[in-house]
């Protein structure tokens, strides 16, 4: 998928599920609104059949970013990655990573801060790592 298609999809999904404030921008709230089960385990993070598993040992920021990534798989992909060839799996991973950038830092909430490029404020308000915020600010 193209960057603009993923950006529009996140925007549409967030409007549909009324994710319109920082208070609603968290894994538990989004999972509930999307009808996805969210489980924290001492394991790697993954998505499978309506369930997102996040590693309980991760920082809050990393959990949030990985949640966005796994939500991307939930919204964009079907099938088992273990059965895919490497190229198809790489495409899905790139799409899920792009989805997470828009899901964790949605335009509707980021726009007022973007001209300032206040990285520290963005990382604090959206609970993401600095490198993640910088990557998102480079996107349209």
Image (spheres, grey):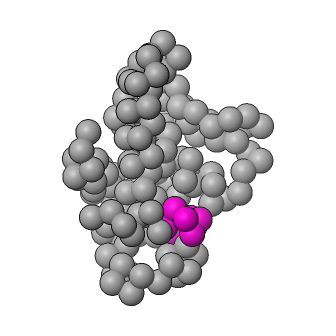
Seen at 37% across and 29% down, the residue is: 77
In this rendering, position of residue 20 left or right of residue 43: left
Q: Quadrant of the C terminus?
A: bottom left
Give coordinates of residue 99: x percent, y percent: 38, 48
Give coordinates of residue 96: x percent, y percent: 42, 41
Quadrant of res 113: bottom left
In this rendering, is residue 91 above or below 110?
A: above
In this rendering, position of residue 47 left or right of residue 14: right
**Stretch in magenta:** 126-133
Quadrant of res 135: bottom left
Give coordinates of residue 79: x percent, y percent: 41, 18
Seen at 70% across and 42% down, the residue is: 55
The rendered magenta stretch, by its main secondary structure, is classed as helix
Give yes or no for residue 132 being in the magenta stretch. Answer: yes
Q: Would residue 39 be visible to someone looking at this image?
A: no
Seen at 46% across and 22% down, the residue is: 86
Residue projecting furthest to the top: 83
Q: Quadrant of the N terminus?
A: top left
| Total tally of numbered discs in the picture | 0
């Amino acid at each position: 998928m193209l960057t603009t298609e993923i950006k529009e999809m996140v925007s549409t999904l967030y409007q549909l599920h009324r994710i319109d404030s920082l208070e609603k921008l968290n894994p538990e709230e989004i999972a509930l609104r999307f009808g996805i089960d969210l489980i924290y385990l001492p394991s790697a993070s993954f998505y499978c059949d309506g369930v997102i598993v996040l590693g309980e040992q991760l920082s809050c920021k990393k959990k949030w970013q990985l949640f966005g990534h796994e939500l991307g798989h939930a919204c964009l992909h079907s099938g088992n990655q273990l059965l895919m060839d490497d190229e198809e799996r790489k495409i899905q991973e790139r799409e899920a990573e792009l989805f997470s950038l828009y899901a964790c830092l949605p335009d509707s909430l980021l726009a007022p801060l973007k001209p300032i490029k206040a990285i520290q404020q963005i990382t604090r308000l959206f609970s993401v790592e600095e490198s993640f915020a910088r990557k998102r600010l480079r996107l349209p």
